[in-house]
Amino acid sequence: MCGHVHPAVAVTVGPGGSTEKKSTSSVVNVVQDSTRQQDLVSSTTSEAEPRSESSAVFERDRDRPSFGGRLLTDEANVFSQNAWDHVEMTEEDRQRALAKIAEHAQNAVDPAVRDDVVANAPQYWDQFYTTNQEKFFKERQWLPIEFPELFAPPQGRTAANIADDLTDLPFTIMEVGCGAGGATVFPLLKEWRKLADAETPPGEPAADPNLLIHACDFSSVAVQHLKTLDEFDPKHINAFVYDLASPDIPESVAAESVDIVVLIFIFSALPPPKWKQAMENVYKILKPGGLVLLRDYARLDLAQVRMKKGRLLEENLYMRGDKTMVYFFTTDEIRELAEQQGFEITQLGLDQRLLVNRGKQLRMNRNWLQCKLRKPHVVGTVSRSE
């Protein structure tokens, strides 16, 4: 399972869209931080081509974005560009979106279809990867921008030698929903090799990065294909099939052994009753002080509004044409889920964009949610719920 990603970067509408590089995050942060190729109006599985070169985080408790960006300061200019950053939905746009979602409720899927989609989620992702393999999801070039923690060795250590003082383990990252590896796993290992190479003294062989990536997906087809690719290196990548909502953590991943868990468009692929168990497993896997980097769909996103009739499984949970699932979150839902598990929330915000079709004079709102969670620095604390 690999998320349906539309990252927090300057986006385009079709081949003629804007490609402006911006210098700000457009994630509206609702808590203070304490420590895109195909047409984006599609609601099918898609991976956007990133364009930005700096973070998209915007803190709501500030008067304005920390840096620059393409900001809509005069509504009269809305159709002068293809995309605008930091644009909250107007009341008119909001009511129009709510009306469309109300129509979805009048055309929900048959309960038997809903039960099939939920029960056989891995099967439908297997079908997706059988068709697309590694070709569909492109490299997430926005990762160093939004989640720089993935690309920086811990303070005082180097990429080539960062063994943990307590466990003597390498810096350990776990990506849930790794797909065939091309979006995150392989690019991440490539960048760490560059870091280690840069630290190698002249004339010496390139140092090997002290990095371990647990790459898991509940699609066995995706994992099998990942292992066949040239970029796969079993020394640094532990690839396995795993459902995050399983009753237990993976056999090959020890409790409290992971520094960072990456959840990019993962929880939206799970029905709500499975969220609690999934979050509990994430908590168990993380070291004290470990991070969760989460990005997902937000409520009233264009992909939700544009859903066709007969796709609603339950409130805010839909099936796509390929029968993969997608849920559209509010920040309050993520906050409650994280706090109930005992996480500290260091970032929780919205990336809100306005896409414009100037020819048709259309306004299209994209809404994504981004979150960073930290497990408290209490050794041996496995879960608040236990």
Image (cartoon, rainbow, N blue to C red):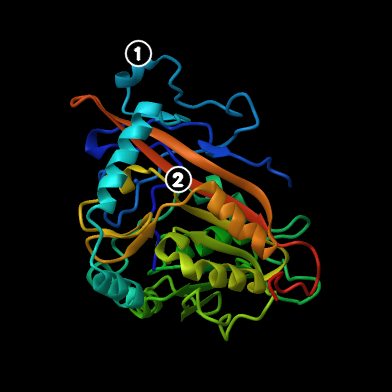
Q: Quadrant of the C terminus?
A: bottom right
Residue 173's image quarter? bottom right
Residue 155's image quarter? bottom right
Within-10-Å neighbours for mark 2: few <14, some 14–19, many 20+: many
x, y (%) of residue 317? 36, 58
The answer to whether residue 297 is above or below residue 355 is below
Residue 9's image quarter? top left
User: At 48% across and 69% down in the image, what residue appears?
Assistant: 273
The answer to whether residue 76 is above or below residue 216 is above
Q: Secondary structure at mark 1?
A: helix
Q: Secondary structure at mark 2?
A: strand
Residue designated by label 2: 368
User: At 65% across and 32% down in the image, what residue appears?
Assistant: 61
Residue designated by label 1: 76
Q: Is residue 282 left or right of residue 99?
A: right
x, y (%) of residue 22? 47, 31
